Image (spheres, helix red, strand yellow):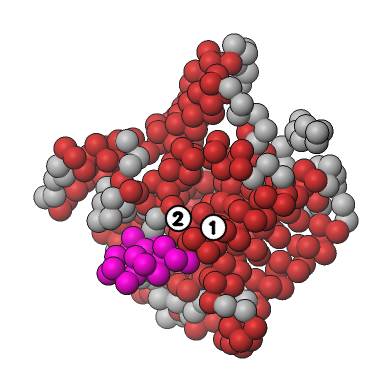
Amino acid sequence: MHPPPRIHHGPQVNAIESLRGIAALMVLIYHLAELVKLPLPETLGFIPKYFGLGVPLFYALSGFVLAFGYADRLYSRSQLLSFYSRRLFRIMPLFYSLLAIWLFLSWLVWNKTFSVEIIFLNLSFLFGLVPGQHESIVWAGWSIGIEMLFYLVFPIVALLVHDYRTALLGFVVTCILSNATYTALMDAGLKSYAYMNLVNHLPYFLAGMAVYRIWQRLGFKRHAAGWILLSAALILALLFPTDKAHALLGMVFSPLTLRFGWAIIFGMLILSACLAANPLLERGPLRNLGQISFSMYLLHPLLMVALIKAGLVPWVTAITPNTGTAFALGLFITTFLVWAASSLSFRFIEYPGINLGRRVSARFTGKTSTV
């Protein structure tokens, strides 16, 4: 018989929270260009194409964090109930708050209402299973639907990928399954749903889980090789988007490799954070952004709509004719407002929900809840 897997009992990897902050900033900057339509200088032309990858990065981080916190621990009914209650109360308070706001604004501003069935799909987080409703009433909520569906199946996935070998195999299998699903949905004319569904994004979750299993195999130790891995991940992230790199990889590998090369890069980035303590990620403002990243993600479309109505783009472009300066000014204003609103949202909505989830979880496990 194999010995039981080693479970991590040490401190949290603070850098993971900072990486969440980076992912949130990527999505915010992406929507500043695509939603607000703030003019971009030519040197930042890569933003619309690549900064949307902040969402898949969130998924890879989520896969790692779930494995970090719950892998090899979900073997009883009480443990499963504890897991689901924590996850539910982590997401539900803020999502429901934004759902109420968007329902009200849709009626007040756009004279739009929703049927009971559609509202139920959003309340139950099942909208991700229904093409046409998968984007949610809450703007940017489509990714939360995918996240919640992954929470639902995570205990089964965790049992299947019980070591680094099965995790790597699971990553390859989900890449193949994702590619086949994406192709089939595109052929069926469901272009938006082809991208915004759980199966399409499974490889990112599995990449994060594979990182945990690899680190587990290494004994959860710190190692200087993490710096080499970080350098390699950054170099690949810079080279991977280039046309020459795509042409070369397309000749040697398959389109599947091109599509999920980012999952491998994200995995390398996360593993480097586990192995090497990077002071830029272990502490500082990025950790604060990571802590409030969920609020940043759900609140920023709402605030951006308000900034559009307030005339942000004409205002900043009137101040300076320089496109780069105008974009920097618009980014500063938007980021500050989103940070301020998200800090309040975390303090008064998310944090109480987290504590409630802990108390409910403690009822199932019989352990004392600590905050």
The range drawn in magenta is: 179-195
Q: Quadrant of residue 11?
A: top right
Instruction: Say which element carries label 1.
Output: helix
Q: Is residue 60 left or right of residue 104?
A: right
- Decide which of 208, 270 is in the foreground and name it: 208
Q: Please say whether residue 30 is one of the residues in the magenta stretch.
A: no
Q: What label does residue 174 carry, if any?
A: 1
Q: Quadrant of the C terminus?
A: top right
- Decide which of 123, 176 is in the foreground and name it: 176
Q: Residue 213's spot in the image, x, y percent?
A: 72, 46
Which comes before the other along the chain, label 2 or label 1? 1
Task: Identify the residue position indicated by label 2 in the image.
Answer: 199
Which residue type does callout 2 highlight? Val
- Decide which of 107, 327 is in the foreground and name it: 107
Query: How many residues crowd around disc 1 within 10 Å: few (fewer than 14), some, or many (20 or more)?
Result: many
Looking at the image, do the residues carrying marks 2 and 1 touch, with CB atoms under 8 Å apart?
yes
Can residue 265 be seen from the camera position used here?
yes
